[in-house]
Image: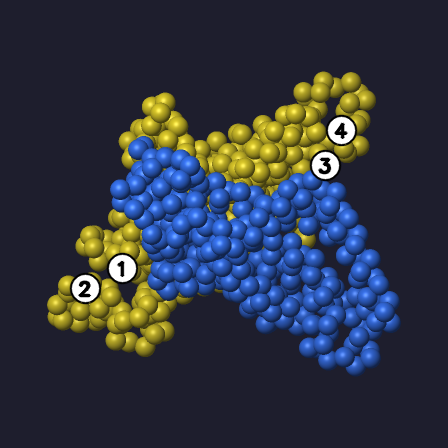
Amino acid sequence: MNEAKTMKTTGQTREVWRRLKRNRAAVIGGLIVFLFFFVAILAPVISPYPPNEGDLTKRLKPPCREHPLGTDPLGRDQLSRVIYGARISLQIQVVAVLIALVIGTLLGMVGGYYGGKFDNLIMRLMDILLAFPGIFLAISIIAVLGPGLTNLMLAAGIYSIPQFARIVRGSILSLKEKEFVEAARAVGENDFNILFRYLLPNSMAPMIIQTTLRMATVLLTASGLSFLGLGVQPPTPEWGAMLSTARAYMITAPHVATAPGLAIMLVVMGFNLFGDGLRDSLDPRLRD
Amino acid sequence: MGRYILKRVLMLLPVLLGVSLVSFSLLHMVPGDPAELLAGEEANPEFIQALRKEYGLDQPLYIQYFHFISHVVRLDFGISIRNRQPVIKLLKERFLFTLQLSFLSILIAGLIGLVAGVISATKQYSFFDNMSMIGALFGVSMPIFWFGLLLMLVFSVHLRWFPAGGKGTALHLILPAIALGAASSAVIARMTRASMLEVIRQDYIRTARANGLREFIIIYKHALKNAMIPVITVFGLEFGYMLGGAVLTETVFSLPGVGRLMVEGIFQRDYPVVQGSMLLVATTFVLVNLLTDIAYAFFDPKIRYE
C-alpha cells in the first residue's frame, strides 16, 4: 500500500512539475525567486564592499564603474547594501511566514476538525485580527511591541496568521467527511494521527500556494514598516529603511531610491508569479 | 433582507468588542505604569495620581475596561499626551483627510480597473489584454511608498505638474491618490476581467448576440451588470485596505492623515492617540465591510438565503 502511495505521490509531483515548467510566467517568477535566494545566501561572497562601511568623500555618487549602483548619503556602496538587503528581507520573510504557517495551520486544523465553540472562538479571534486593515494591523502590533527587527518579524508573522488559519480550516472542513478519513477512524486511528497523517498532507497544496504568495505580502509589509521607521533600524541595510533615507535625496540623488525600490518590486513580483503558477499547476480548477 | 442585515450587524458586535479590547490592552501591554505612560515623561506625581483616579487605573482591569468603553462610546478617547488636546479633535481632522484621500483613490482605481478589465475581457489575449495584465502585475508588486516617490520625482520635481506634498488644493491629492490606488486598480482590473470572461460565455449573452443586439449594448448593459456583482466586494475591501495603506502615502507626501497621526503617536509614546487611531480605523474598516456585504446581498439575492 505504501508503495502504491509513493508511486501516486511521485506521479502527481511529476505532473505538477510538468505543468509548472510549461507556465512561462511561473518559470520567470521561479528564476527571480531563485536569484533572490542565491544573492541572499551568498551576500558576503558576492558583495563588492562591506555594507556598512562608507567613505564620506564619496557620498551620493551616481552609478559608476567603481560603484555600479552609486553610493548613499554616507558614501556606502549601494550595490553591496542592496545585496545584503536581500539577506535581511529573506530572513524577515522566512521567520514571519513560518510563524504564521505554524500557528495559523494549527489553529485552522483544530478549528476545522473539532468545530463547535472552539472553532467559533478561533474564527472570531481571526476576525478581530482582520478588523485592522492591511499594514495597519502590523503597525498596531508594533505599537505594543516597539520597533526593531525581531518585533517586525513577529508583527509580520501575526499579521499573516488569519490567512493561513482560514485556508487550512476550509481545507480540513472539506476533507474531514471524506471516505479516507472515515476509513482511518474505522481502523482506530486517533485524532492526532488523522490530523497530521491524513488531513494535513492533503491540505498541502493550498498551504504551499499561500506560503509563496505570503512571502510577497510580508516583504511589502515589512519594508513598509521599515520605511515608516517602525521596523529595521539604520544602519542595517534593509530595503524599506534604505528608501526611507533616500526620500530626503530624491531631487539631488534619485539613484539612491531606485535600487532598493526595484529590488522590492522584483522579488514581490517573483513570488507573485511563482505563487500564481503553483496555484495553476497544483489545482488547475482554480485557474482564472 | 432585513433579517440578513440584522444577522450581519449582530456578527459585528463581538468583533468590535475584540477591537476595543485590543486597543484597551495596548496601554497595559506596554512596559510601565499606565498612569505614568498616560501622563507623559515630564509629569509630576500629583498629576499622575490625578490621572490614575480619573481613568480608574487603580481599579481592577475589568472595571478599567468598562470605564474605557463608557468613554469610547461617548467618543471620548482621552487627551493627547503631546498636544494636550482632546484626541477626538485630532482624529476628526486627520480622519476626514484620510477618508477624502481614500475616496479619491478608489474612484481613480475603480475607473482604471473597470475600463482595463472590461476591455481585457472583451479582447482576451490581445495586445491590450497582455499589456494591462502586465500593468496589473506591476501594480500589485510595486511598494506604495516607492511608487509614490517615483510619481513625485517625475510629476512634481521634473514636470512640475503637481505639488510635491502637503495639503490645500485638489491638486495636492492627485499623486497620493494614484500611488495609493495603483494596487487596487490592478486587483479590480483582474477581478473585472475574470468576472466578465465568465459572464460573456453564458447562454444569455449568446442569445443577445443571436438576437442581433449591438455589441456595445451587450457588453456594457447586459454583461457588465452581472459581472459587477463580485467586483463590488473587491471595491469595498480595497477601500477598506486603503484606510490602512494610506499611512505609507501620507508619509511619502507629508500629508496629515490618521495613519501618520498613529505612527507619530507611536514614536512620541502618545498612547491615547494610538488607541484612538486604532479604534477609529478598525471600526470604520469593519463598517465598510458590513456595507459591502449588504450591497453584495442586495445585488445577489442568492447570498441572502445561504
* Gap in angstroms between the C-alphas marked 1 and 3: 51 Å
Judge the density around disc 2: few (<14), some (14-19), many (≥20) Cα neighbours within 10 Å. Answer: few
Q: Are marks 2 and 1 in contact (CB under 8 Å)?
A: yes
Quarter-of-image position of residue B253: top left
Q: Which residue is mark 3?
A: B198
Residue A136 image label: none
Residue B196 placement (x, y as % from top left):
68, 33
Q: Which residue is mark 4?
A: B205
Q: Earlier in the sequence, mark 1 or mark 3?
A: 3
Quarter-of-image position of residue A190: bottom right
Query: Can residue B104 be spotted in the picture?
Result: no
Q: Are marks 2 and 4 in contact (CB under 8 Å)?
A: no
Judge the density around disc 3: few (<14), some (14-19), many (≥20) Cα neighbours within 10 Å. Answer: some
Residue mark closest to the camera, 1 vs 3: 1
Residue mark closest to the camera, 2 vs 3: 2
Q: Earlier in the sequence, mark 4 or mark 3?
A: 3
Quarter-of-image position of residue B229: top right
Residue B41 image label: 2
Query: Can residue A63 be spotted in the picture?
Result: yes
| Chain (yellow) | B
The residue type indicated by label 2 comes to Glu
Q: Colour of chain A?
A: blue
Residue A258 placement (x, y as % from top left):
42, 38
Residue B269 image label: 1
Residue mark closest to the camera, 1 vs 4: 1
* Gap in angstroms between the C-alphas marked 1 and 4: 59 Å
Q: Are marks 2 and 3 in contact (CB under 8 Å)?
A: no
Quadrant (top left, top right, bottom left, bottom right) of the C terminus of chain A: top right
The chain letter for the residue carrying disc 1 is B
Residue at 29% x, 46% y: name it.
Answer: A55
Q: Are marks 1 and 3 in contact (CB under 8 Å)?
A: no
